[in-house]
Image (tube, helix red, strand yellow):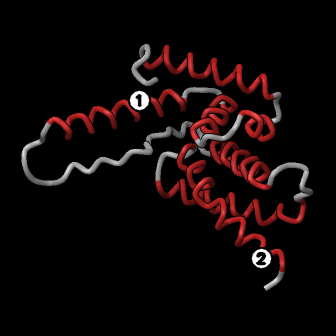
Amino acid sequence: MEDREIKFKELVNQNHERIYRICAYHTSGLDDCNDLYQQILINVWQALHSFRGDSKLSTWIYRIALNTAIDFNRAETRRMISKSKYQLDLGHSGPWGESTWEKIRMEKLVDHLWQQINQLSVIDKVIISLVLEEITSKEIADVVGISETNVRVKIHRIKETLKLNIGGTLYE
């Protein structure tokens, strides 16, 4: 196996979950998520020879993944993010207890949050998805191509917008 293939396999193994979460943030269904994931891997493979080491490898991959996601969404207009990070386990028998209703309520709240995130501008959606990935402001700045200070200001404004649109401090 050649060096490029080995390096690619290592990159995929190290970044699989991150790439998949980016796909989930930017798509509304499993098929679209898988299609976007495949496209990102193709783009990483094609660009692998051009990595110069000017940034961290994870930052470079984020940039490719996010640019691919933006292009994917442009091609498929009016795509809504309807997936949440939380899955319900409601069961199929017995009376619905308080905890089941709480799970339903939480799922609706999370879905509403994702709908509000989907209404953000492309750059704001990218920034908040990276915040949700717990990426540092510095790394977000490198990925997005703006200053770290500007990233922090944008994060604050995005949170305020989401809080206002969702209804106060309910989601803090």
In the image, taking residue 66 as reference, residue 80 lies left or right, namely left
Q: Quadrant of residue 141?
A: top right
The image position of residue 146, as x and y in percent, is 82, 30
Residue 100 pos. (x, y %): 20, 40
**x 20%, y 38%: residue:** 99
* In the image, residue 97 above or below residue 64: above
| Label 2 crowd bin: few (<14), some (14–19), many (20+), radius 10 Å | few
Question: Callout 2, which amino acid?
Answer: Glu
Judged from the image, the secondary structure of the residue bearing numbered disc 1 is helix
Query: Circle 2 sits in a helix, a strand or a loop, which is it?
Result: helix
Residue 170 is left or right of residue 4, and the answer is: left
Which residue in the protein does label 1 denote? 112
Give the residue at x 49% y 14%: 164
Residue 20 in the figure: left or right of residue 106 = right
In terms of sequence position, does the residue under pointer 1 or pointer 2 come before the other?
2
In the figure, residue 78 lies in which quadrant? top right
Q: The residue under label 1 is which amino acid type?
A: His
Task: Kindly identify which residue carries mark 2.
Answer: 5
Residue 42 % position (x, y): 72, 64
